[in-house]
Amino acid sequence: VSHEAKCWGAEEQSMSGEAAAGPRGVNVKDVASHDFVVAYASHLKRIGKIEVPKWADLVKTASYKELAPYDPDWYYIRAAAIARRVYIRKGTGVGGLKKAFGGRVHRGTRPEKYATGSGSIARHILKQLETLKIIEKVAGGKGRQITAQGQRDLDSIAGQIGCK
C-alpha cells in the first residue's frame, strides 16, 4: 500500500486483491519514534500548557550524568517521550520510566554499570501530563495509562507526521 493511500483515505488492497474494510488511520505505532517525539515536543511547547519548572536549567537527567542537557527544550522532549511510552505500554510508572531513561555509568578503569534515570523528573512530567488530561492513573492498579483524549491528540500528531 502506498504512503499516499494511508494519508488520503484510499482503500487498501489485501494480498488477494480485494479491498480492505476501509481506510486505516495512522497512529503513534506507525511513525518513527524520533520523528514523533520531536513533533509532539514542539506541539507541547506551542500550546504552552506545560509549565517548565524553575530547576529545569540546573538539573541533570540522571545521577550518572556529568552535565545538564544542552538543549533548552529538553523538558518538552522528555515529556513527549514519556507520553509516547505510556501510549505504547499501559501501566508504565515512575520506576519503569527510570529504567527506560537510564544508561551506563562511567567508573574510570572499572567496568561500566547500569544506572537509572531521574525519578523526580519522570514524576513531575507525569503529573503535568495528568493535568493536561493526556494520561491518567490506572484504576485499581499501579502506573499510568493514556486517556481517550490523549490518544486522539497523539494520533493526530502521528497522522500529521505520517502524511508529510
Image (tube, rainbow, N blue to C red):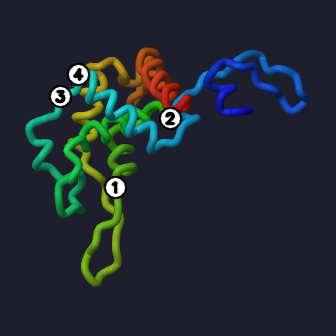
> Which quarter of the figure has residue 8?
top right
Q: Sequence order check: which comes first, mark 2 or mark 3?
A: 3
Q: Give the amino acid type for the residue marked by disc 1 in the picture.
A: Gly
**Residue at the disc numbered 3:** 51
Does label 1 or label 4 sit earlier along the sequence?
4
Q: Residue visible at 41% across and 20% down?
A: 150
Residue behind mark 2: 88
* Mark 3 element type: loop
Query: Residue 144: x and y, percent?
Result: 39, 29
- The image position of residue 42, as x and y in percent, is 32, 33
Disc with the residue nearer the chain's start (1 vs 2): 2
Q: Residues within 10 Å of mark 4 (few under 14, many from 20)?
A: few
The dot on residue 81 is none
Q: Quadrant of residue 62?
A: bottom left
Front residue of 112/153: it is 153
Q: Are marks 4 and 3 in contact (CB under 8 Å)?
A: yes
Residue 107 in the image: state x and y as whole percent: 26, 75
Say which mark, if any, is on residue 49. 4
Q: CA distance from mark 2 to mark 3?
A: 24 Å
